[in-house]
Image (spheres, rainbow, N blue to C red):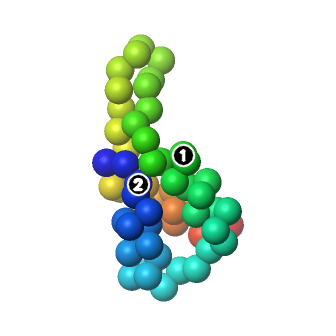
Amino acid sequence: MVLTEKYLKTYLKNHRISMSDSLKEDLLNDYGSSVVDDQGRLREYTEQDICEQIRKIVLK
């Protein structure tokens, strides 16, 4: 799964979370595309990975 702007808006609305536009852009840049690991394999984040990262950022 990759983070989309639509998914992020829905997630924030459902959890009643607000954050700055720059923080949203950072999340989209970090989790909005697949990642190539050290061995050259394409890796996508799971929905749980993305939700945990959003939760950690909100708690800061």
Q: Is residue 33 above or below residue 17?
A: above
Query: Label 2 crowding class (10 Å Cα cut-off): few <14, some 14-19, many 20+?
Result: many
Instruction: Specify the quadrant that holds the C terminus.
Output: bottom right
Q: Is residue 29 left or right of residue 7?
A: right
> Residue 16: image x %, image y %?
48, 85
Q: Is residue 1 left or right of residue 8?
A: left
Q: Residue furthest top?
A: 39
The residue that disc 2 covers is 3
Between residue 56 and residue 25, name the one nearer to us.
25
For badge 2, the amino acid type reads Leu
Question: Residue at 36% of width from left, 32% of height from top?
Answer: 43
Question: Residue at 43% of width from left, 41% of height from top?
Answer: 33
Question: Residue at 64% of width from left, 62% of height from top?
Answer: 23
Element type where label 1 sits in the image: helix
Element type where label 2 sits in the image: loop
> Residue 21: image x %, image y %?
64, 68
Residue 57 can be seen in this image: no
Q: Is residue 57 left or right of residue 47?
A: right
Quarter of the rendering containing residue 22: bottom right
Answer with mark 1 or mark 2, whichever residue precedes in sequence.
2
Query: Label 1 crowding class (10 Å Cα cut-off): few <14, some 14-19, many 20+?
Result: some
Q: Is residue 44 left or right of residue 56?
A: left
Q: Residue furthest bottom?
A: 16
Question: Residue at 62% of width from left, 74% of height from top?
Answer: 19
Q: Is residue 27 above or below residue 12?
A: above
Residues marked 1 and 2 touching at CB (< 8 Å): yes
Residue 5 can be seen in this image: yes
> Residue 30: image x %, image y %?
54, 46
For badge 1, the amino acid type reads Asp
The residue that disc 1 covers is 30
Between residue 1 and residue 52, name the one nearer to us.
1
> Residue 4: image x %, image y %?
40, 58
